[in-house]
Image (cartoon, rainbow, N blue to C red):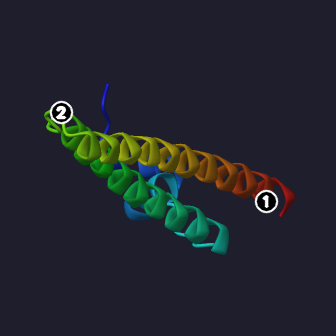
Amino acid sequence: MNLPIETVAAATGTTAANSLVSKNLDTSITINNLFTNATSIIALVAGMIAFIYLVYSGILYLTAAGNPDSAKKGQQGIINAIIGIIIIVAAWAIIGAISGTSKTLV
């Protein structure tokens, strides 16, 4: 049975708007939240750039057509992109672990 929000709010002794805000929105902004969100966005953008570079290097390698210089350039680009993705994931995991630890310490 679905009750209107006004009925639920009246039964709990709160207003409908107050009930929605208190249950669905976290209005507190902390430095830890800002830092975590900023690093997540930076990691996402860096990961996208590394993935695009990986695809570009793969295409370069596949279209080398027997040219050893172009094939070597494509191989090196693939290796560099994979190393970059590993570094990005490791940094994101370390920052996530540190920010998770700081939440419990504060």
Q: Which residue is mark 2?
A: 66
Asked whether, in this view, residue 19 is left or right of residue 4, the answer is right
Residue at image mark 1: 102
- Res 6 seen here: no
Pinpoint residue 26: horizontal percent, then vertical percent: 52, 61
Q: Which mark is residue 72?
A: none
Furthest-right residue in this view: 105
The amino acid type of the residue labelled 2 equals: Gly
Indicate the secondary structure of the residue bearing disc 2: loop
Asked if one can make out residue 84 in the rendered structure from this viewpoint, the answer is: yes
User: Tags 2 and 1 in contact by the CB under 8 Å rule?
Assistant: no
Specify few, some or many for label 1: CA neighbours under 10 Å numbering under 14, 14-19, or 20 or more. Answer: few
- Residue 69: percent from left, percent from top: 28, 46
Q: Residue 25 location, x and y as percent? A: 46, 59
User: Residue at point 81% right, 53% down?
Assistant: 104
Q: Quadrant of the C terminus?
A: bottom right
Q: Residue at x 24, y 38 (%)?
A: 61
Give left or right: position of 5 versus 42: left
- Disc with the residue nearer the chain's start (2 vs 1): 2
Mark nearest the camera among 2 and 1 is 2
Task: Say how many tags the image has.
Answer: 2
For the N terminus, the quadrant is top left
Occupied quadrant, residue 45: bottom left
Q: Please report the residue visible at 44 percent of the width from the left and 62 percent of the height from the top.
A: 41
Q: CA distance from mark 2 to mark 1?
A: 54 Å
Looking at the picture, tell me which residue is in the foreground, 7 or 37. Answer: 37
Image quadrant in which you'd find residue 44: bottom left
Q: Amino acid at mark 1?
A: Ser
Disc 1, SS = helix
Q: Foreground: 2 or 74? A: 74
